Amino acid sequence: MTAKRQALLDELLVRDRSLSCMPLTWLRRSAKSNSPAAICNALQPACLQQQRVTD
């Protein structure tokens, strides 16, 4: 495992003030309904994770 990948994984376990929780917890949340807003909120973690991996 590269040092960059290790740091990325370690960041998932540190509480993020903007999310009010650890990113790992935020990434595991699912949509609560089928509304457009709930779907967009459910896609945010996937987009963030993809962005982190490609950087």
Image (cartoon, grey):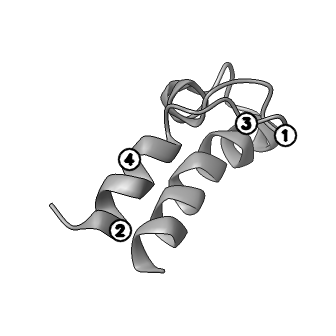
Q: How many marks?
A: 4
Instruction: Residue type at mark 1: give it.
Output: Ser
Using the image, tell me which numbered label, if any, was put on residue 10: none
- The reply to whether discs 1 and 3 touch (Cβ–Cβ < 8 Å) is yes
Along the polypeptide, which appears first: circle 2 or circle 1? 2
Q: Quadrant of residue 54?
A: bottom left
Name the residue rendered at 78%, 34% in the picture.
Answer: 19
Instruction: Residue type at mark 3: give it.
Output: Asp
- The reply to whether discs 2 and 1 touch (Cβ–Cβ < 8 Å) is no
Using the image, tell me which numbered label, if any, was put on residue 4: 2
Q: Residues within 10 Å of mark 3 (few under 14, many from 20)?
A: few
Is residue 19 left or right of 23 when viewed as pictured? right
Helix, strand or loop at label 3? It is loop
Q: CA distance from mark 2 to mark 1?
A: 23 Å
Helix, strand or loop at label 4? It is helix
Name the residue rendered at 48%, 80% in the picture.
Answer: 55
* Nearer the camera: disc 2 or disc 3: 2
Using the image, tell me which numbered label, if any, was put on residue 16: 3
Q: CA distance from mark 4 to mark 3?
A: 14 Å
Along the polypeptide, which appears first: circle 2 or circle 3? 2
Is residue 29 left or right of 32 when viewed as pictured? left
Q: Which quadrant of the rendered structure holds the N terminus?
A: bottom left
- The reply to whether discs 4 and 3 touch (Cβ–Cβ < 8 Å) is no
Along the polypeptide, which appears first: circle 4 or circle 2? 2
List the residue tagged with mark 4.
9
